[in-house]
Image: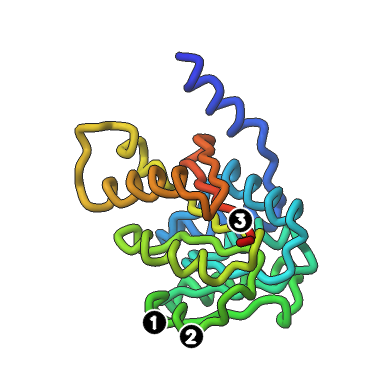
Amino acid sequence: MGEHDANHRFAAEATIEPDHIIRARAHALELGAAPVSPEVGAQCAVIAAASGALNIVEIGTGAGVSGLWLLHGSPRATLTTIDNEPEHLGAARQAFADAKIPAARARFITGRAGEVLPRMNEASYDIVLVDADADGVIEYVEHGLRLVRAGGTVLVPRVLAGGAVADPVKRDAVTTAYRSLIQETQASPAVIGALSIVGEGLLQLTTVASD
């Protein structure tokens, strides 16, 4: 096993997932709603905690795993989560109820993100997590950067596309979109960006206040 693989394995084994998120993960896998890895979930929780997030938007609910991690990091936050799969939203509602998260702390919206996001208030959120419709990732990140306040953060898991982004031979539309997103945001003066390669990868973009 190479050093890279050993580091990944160690990070995975070292991450301890709360019991209520373990249960939500099991249900997500039963539904085929691929959840973020525990390593990426833990990173999201740390960012939520460090930023003192109170208002969070999640694009792509799944069965609630990423939302539970965000609220684990910032237990006083209110989460607005968007998904076009009613079954997934139902599973997330149940997972949140099982975790004893007050109903007022989570808002579930059924619909396509491309139709919902334009109606949301700009510069009103601390964190936007983008985990839906990989072929629309650039559009959703643009919305996310509009929705977060100055100093707010947009999080994009799965951004390495299972290793495809690092392979120059891979040129399909989704891989190219992720690759462009990473390159363009790293070069942008409007955000401070960092790319984590732990788990399935996590792109972190924090907006810079204008002068």
Residue at label 1? 115
**Residue 78, how many percent across, how many down?**
70, 73
Name the residue at 54% across, 27% down.
Answer: 9
Front residue of 96/167: it is 167
Residue designated by label 3: 208
Residue displayed at 53% across by 20% down: 6
Q: State the separation of the CA atoms marked 1 and 2.
A: 8 Å
Q: Are marks 1 and 2 in contact (CB under 8 Å)?
A: yes
Please rate how many residues cluster around mark 3, counting C-alpha atoms within 10 Å: few if below 14, some from 14 to 19, many from 20: some
The disc, 3 or 1, on the residue closer to the chain's N-terminal end is 1
Of the image marks 2 and 3, the number of the one nearer the N terminus: 2
Q: Is residue 45 above or below residue 149?
A: above
The amino acid type of the residue labelled 1 equals Glu
Q: Is residue 174 left or right of residue 137?
A: left
**Residue 46 spot, x, y in % from top left:** 71, 48
Q: Tell which of 46 and 23 is nearer to you.
A: 46
Is label 1 or label 2 in front? 2
User: For mark 2, does the 10 Å Cα neighbourhood hold few (<14), some (14 to 19), or many (20 or more) residues?
Assistant: few
Mark 2 residue type? Arg
Where on the picture, by quarter, is residue 208? bottom right
Look at mark 2 in the image and give the residue it sits on.
119
Tell me what residue is drawn at x 70 percent, y 62 percent: 71
Quarter of the image that includes the C terminus: bottom right
Is 113 or 184 nearer to us in this picture? 184
